[in-house]
Amino acid sequence: RGDWRNISSETYERFEAFESIEPQFIGRIVFPIKDASGIIVVFLGRHTTMNHSPKYLFHPRKVKIPLFPLVTPIEGKVILVEGIFDMLNLHDKGLTNAICTFGTNTLNVEKLELLKIQGIDGVDFLFDGDEAGRSAAEKGAALAESCGLSTRNIALKDGEDPGSLSANTIIKLKEKLYG
C-alpha cells in the first residue's frame, strides 16, 4: 500500500504493514505492534474507508498496548502523538523520534516510566489541535512530569493533527525543536 494518507510505501514497509486475508482484517492495513523487547503483542488493523466502524481493530483484544515504536530519541526526547498514522506521517517526513499512544486514554505512568528506563528524559506532546487533544496533552504532561520526564506541549492550530502535517511543516518543526 503506497502513499495512502500521503505516506510512502517505504514507510509502510519499514513498519511491516500488510493487507490480510483474515475475515476481520479485510479492507484494513495491518500493523504488527511490538513491545520494547521486539515481540509482537498485538496486530492493529486500520480500515481504509473513513466511515467504517470500527475504524481500528486490535487482535487479540484486551492486550496491554505499548507505546510504539521503540525509537532513538533526539536530544534525549521523543515526540508523543495520539495515533499510528500521526506517527507514520512524522517518520515518513523525517521526524523519527515520534511514538504513538494509540489514543489519549491509554497513556499511563507505567508506559512513561518505561521511557525513562530506555534512557529518554523528555517528551514533546504533539496531540491533535482540538480541545480534546489540548486537554489530553496537558494531562499527559502532568503524568510525564510525575515520572521525572521533562515535557513540552506543541500546540497545533484548530483542526490540525500530526497525521495531516506537510513535509515542509514537519521539517520546520524538527528544526524548531532540535536545531
Image: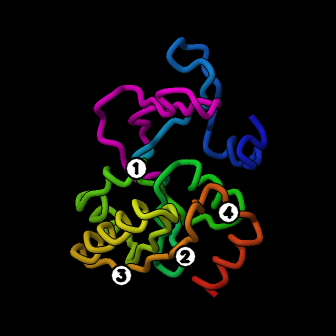
Residue found farthest to the top: 23
Q: Position of residue 117 (x, y in %)?
A: 31, 67
What amino acid is at disc 4?
Leu
- Badge 2 element: loop
> Mark 1 and mark 3: span between their CA atoms?
21 Å
Residue that mark 3 sits on: 150
**Residue at image mark 2:** 74
- Relative to 52, 101 lies left or right: left
Q: Is residue 133 above or below residue 119?
A: above
Residue range of the region highlighted in magenta in the rendering: 39-68
Structural distance between the alpha carbons of marks 1 and 2: 23 Å
Residue type (three-letter) at the residue carrying disc 2: Ile
Q: Quadrant of the N terminus?
A: top right
Instruction: Look at the numbered discs 4 and 3 and tell me whether their residues touch, using CB distance below 8 Å.
Output: no
The residue that mark 1 highlights is 103
Residue corresponding to mark 4: 165
